[in-house]
């Protein structure tokens, strides 16, 4: 499986996708590979956390998970430290690249901050199905339906040096954004049988 090869080469890594495409992402995890997923500590996210546990994922609950760029605020720092600890223990972590507050399809600085702090690569991932429901939400959530043709595209790894300054961090943030957009476009093209 392509995902097994990805884990063999890069694990533990930071898996990231756009918010509206996150629902199917846990299914690409090889059964033998540990993955912890960042989930908001809001009660509204309790069902998501329970589903992830049933699928065999670990869960990191964090207040402020809606925007890890604010890692110093209520609970955000604890979530950041938990992700860093998971990576140090050899567990891949997964989180959405964009967050609430009108930032759809804009990579949060928290993603590259985690890569800098942990020394682990970021892997952009897009999972799309030809049969899907796209909800009229801020993130245009896409929910795959049965019997569709699926495409899972992994973007090239992005690494962030431990001594990266603000300018380089912003450059890396833009690099992750470009690679995730490219992976997403390719996944839609494959699933919908467009020219790629």
Image (tube, rainbow, N blue to C red):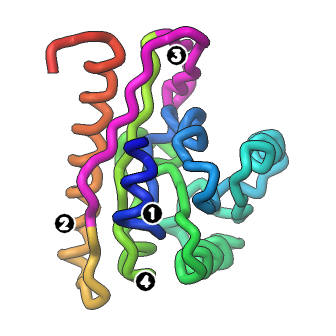
Q: Residue at x 28, y 47 (%)?
A: 155
Q: Secondary structure at mark 3?
A: strand
In depth, the one of 117 and 27 nearer the eye is: 27
Q: Residue at x 55, y 9 (%)?
A: 147
Q: To which residue does mark 1 refer?
A: 14
Is residue 132 shown above or below 110?
above
* Residue 33 image point, x, y percent: 58, 59
Q: To which residue does mark 3 refer?
A: 134
Is residue 167 shown above or below 183?
below
* Residue 162 image point, x, y percent: 31, 87
Q: To which residue does mark 2 refer?
A: 171
Instruction: Determine the CA span between mark 2 and mark 3.
Output: 31 Å
Q: Nearer the viewer, mark 1 or mark 4?
A: 1
Compare marks 3 and 4 and give the one earlier in the sequence. 4
Q: Secondary structure at mark 4?
A: helix
Compare marks 1 and 4 and give the one earlier in the sequence. 1
Query: Are circles 4 and 2 on residues that touch, CB within 8 Å?
Result: no
User: Does the magenta portion include 148?
Assistant: yes
Q: Nearer the viewer, mark 1 or mark 2?
A: 1
Q: Nearer the viewer, mark 4 or mark 2?
A: 4
Instruction: Determine the CA span between mark 1 and mark 2.
Output: 18 Å
């Amino acid at each position: 499986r392509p995902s097994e090869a990805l884990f063999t080469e890069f694990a533990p890594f930071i898996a990231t996708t756009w918010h509206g495409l996150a629902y199917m992402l846990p299914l690409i995890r090889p059964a033998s590979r540990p993955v912890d997923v960042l989930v908001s500590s809001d009660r509204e996210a309790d069902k998501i956390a329970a589903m992830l546990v049933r699928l065999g994922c670990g869960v990191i609950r964090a207040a402020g998970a809606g925007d890890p760029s604010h890692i110093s605020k209520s609970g955000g720092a604890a979530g950041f430290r938990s992700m860093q600890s998971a990576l140090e223990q050899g567990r891949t972590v997964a989180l959405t690249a964009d967050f609430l507050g009108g930032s759809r399809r804009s990579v949060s600085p928290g993603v590259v901050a985690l890569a800098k702090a942990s020394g682990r690569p970021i892997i952009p991932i897009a999972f799309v199905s030809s049969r899907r429901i796209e909800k009229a939400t801020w993130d245009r959530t896409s929910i795959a339906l049965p019997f569709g043709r699926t495409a899972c595209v992994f973007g090239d790894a992005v690494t962030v040096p431990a001594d990266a300054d603000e300018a380089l961090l912003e450059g890396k943030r833009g690099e992750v954004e470009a690679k995730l957009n490219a992976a997403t476009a390719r996944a839609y093209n494959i699933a919908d049988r467009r020219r790629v």
